[in-house]
Image: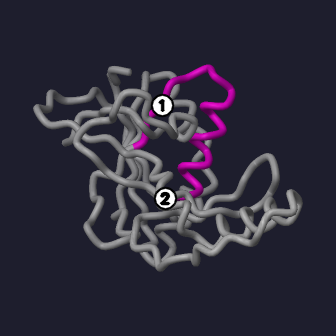
Amino acid sequence: MRPTHHLDILIRSAHIDRELHARLLLLTHRMLAHGEHTLAVAWPDWGDAPGEFGLLFRLFGEEAGLALFDGQLDGLRERKLIRSYPVAAVPASASTVAYLRHRTIEKHTPGFAARQARRNERLGAPKPTRQPQAINCHSLEMQSVSTGRSYALFLKREAAAPEGAGGRQYGLGVTLPDF
């Protein structure tokens, strides 16, 4: 994907910024599920501390898809939770960035251990011995559209997306200009 345009969304409530990032990412996921538009997500204010996404959510894509996305933000704008800026052309940039789903971290979560224990119980296998570890990573609490269950979506930032990077259904795993 070579994005031509971007939409910047400023989160105005810092005390609920992660919830708003998750809501915007879920909207991206839903639009991608319809398959009409190609979108990619970036967090230009990404910080080094775990969970520090900053207050800017940037979405890349074609003009029509970004305008459609922006049109679905009226409720958040009316409540003064966000401010969106006009869709703009992507400026030339020498550096690139990719935001990826961090799947290896998931194997150290309590949820993974519980799923593994349930699976082993069904199969009559011994209980797993691996204990969940403390996780020090960027993550967003998401809610599954299909099951309604909540889960942590772990994320990482790299200079470029490796071949076959996962998470594209969320607008992740795409090499984007960094500006």
In the rendering, which numbered label is found on residue 21?
none
Range covered by the magenta-colored residues: 21-41
Which numbered mark, 1 or 2, is in the foreground of this view? 2
Quarter of the image holding residue 4? top left
Quarter of the image for the C terminus: give it: top left
Residue 154, numbered label = 2
The first of marks 1 and 2 along the sequence is 1
What x and y, as percent, mark residue 32?
A: 60, 31
Above-or-below relation of 129 to 22: below
Q: CA distance from mark 1 to mark 2?
A: 19 Å
Q: Quadrant of residue 137?
A: bottom left
Q: Is residue 46 magenta?
A: no
Q: How is the image coloured?
A: one colour
| Residue neighbourhood size for the residue with mark 1, other residues' Cα within 10 Å, grouped as few (<14), some (14–19), many (≥20) | many
Q: Are marks 1 and 2 in contact (CB under 8 Å)?
A: no
Residue ID for mark 1 = 39
Residue placed most toward the observer, 63 or 177: 177
Looking at the picture, tell me which residue is in the foreground, 94 or 136: 136
Q: Residues within 10 Å of mark 2 (few under 14, many from 20)?
A: many
Q: Position of residue 17 (x, y in %)?
A: 47, 68
Q: Secondary structure at mark 1?
A: strand
Instruction: Name the residue: 59% across, 56% down.
Output: 23
Which x, y percent locates residue 33?
67, 31
The main secondary structure of the magenta stretch is helix
**SS under mark 2:** strand
- The residue located at (31%, 51%) in the rendering is 157
Residue at horizontal 76 percent and vertical 68 percent from the top: 117
What is the three-letter code of the residue carrying label 1?
Leu
Residue at 74% across / 72% down in the picture? 127
